[in-house]
Image (cartoon, rainbow, N blue to C red):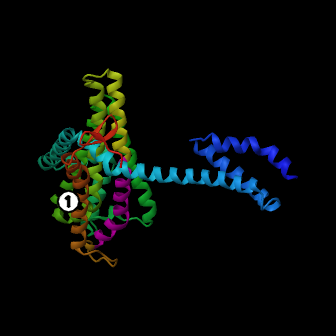
Amino acid sequence: MREARFIKKNVDKWNEYQHEETKDPDEMADRFVTLLDDLSYAKTFYPKSKVTRWINGIAANIYQSIYQNKKQNFSRALRFWKYELPLLFRKYHKLFLFTLLLFVSFVFIGIVSSTNDPDYARQFFNHKIQPGYYDETISSIQRGDPFGVYKDSNPFSMFVRIAYNNISVAFKTVIFGVLFGIGTILFMWTNGLMLGCFQYIFFSQGLGWQSVLVIWIHGTIEISSIVIASCAGIILGTGWLFPGTYTRKQSFLRAAKDAIKICVSLIPFFIIAAFFESYVTHLMSNTFEKNSVEIGLPVPFSIIILAGSFFLILWYFVLYPIRLYRTGFELKGGKIIKDGSVYEK
């Protein structure tokens, strides 16, 4: 094809690509691919032509736009985790404290009920969780393998199953908050009683502190995340019940947006907890198994994980948001404000 015909055939397209920018990433990618085809053709047949340099320049500009968008996306994600989410959660610290105290009271009820009625834990697990679970756990304790429930021949399948289950429970806990928060509280009631009964089983069998060192390797992050998800569910319910100066619809939509952000942000924490439960809790359980031939972990290792997990949750969701607020940061209308001005960094 003659150069003049090649230019005439494509010049309108090149002008459009050069002067009419697009923010649509799919269209931007299509333009870039098209220009690479044209550039390849031009370099083959008109290597020293000005049109070749022109096409190359347009393609370079689009490439820079794509690269810049990637950097902006990364910066936006970093900004969300560094400022937006902590400041968002700080708005609900009082509600989080209420949620935490309510959940602890449910755990306490489970412990007291099991203590007063030794058969309560068995009945609870058989009717609410899984028939035979209580007896299976007691049987494992009696044969010297108290934490056998955490052993799986395939840790990866266990990891996927646990992560999926915990994330789905968290989302259900939040979604059922739309029922004026009652649905979320019912989820908390069941989970709190289950935790109380579960810990009672091991303490009643003289394995209380061993259970803490094993179970709370993953439980520290997992249970904390469930409580935070419950807080998000109550945010959803209170947004519907107490609109304040907003219309009920506006208040609900604002609460739903905040609740979803908090819930989605918990996914990495549930993944970490699932990893600990599948790969680390299993090893720690060998430490307390009688006649175990498998490798166990030293107790200090468990304590380090427990302390580190607790500090991670406490720092990121409580201490760090308070620190940001005291240094002049706040969240208003979805924008990060620093000392009264929009924070752009």
State yes or no: residue 273 in magenta.
Answer: yes
Q: Residue lying at the far right in this picture: please name it.
A: 1
Q: Where is residue 140 in the image (x, y as percent from the top left)?
A: 29, 64
Q: Position of residue 213 (x, y in %)?
A: 22, 65
Instruction: Say above or below: 252 vs 47.
Output: above
Instruction: Say above or below: 92 vs 267.
Output: above
- The residue at the point 44 percent across, 57 percent down is 160
Residue 236 lies in quadrant: top left
- The residue at the point 33 percent across, 58 percent down is 273
- The residue at the point 21 percent across, 49 percent down is 318
Q: Which amino acid does label 1 sit on?
A: Phe
Q: Is the magenta stretch mostly helix, strand or loop?
A: helix
Pointer 1: what residue? 202
Q: Residue lying at the far top in this picture: please name it.
A: 247
Residue 78 horizontal side relative to residue 50, left or right: left
Question: Is residue 220 at least partly visible in the picture?
Answer: yes
State yes or no: residue 18 in magenta.
Answer: no
Q: Position of residue 322 (x, y in %)?
A: 19, 48
The segment highlighted magenta reads 265-286
Task: Name the residue nearer the viewer: 147 or 98.
Answer: 98
Task: Name the residue nearer the viewer: 290 or 82.
Answer: 82
What is the number of callouts on the image?
1
Task: Name the residue nearer the viewer: 33 or 338.
Answer: 338
Q: Where is residue 161 in the image (x, y as percent from the top left)?
A: 43, 55
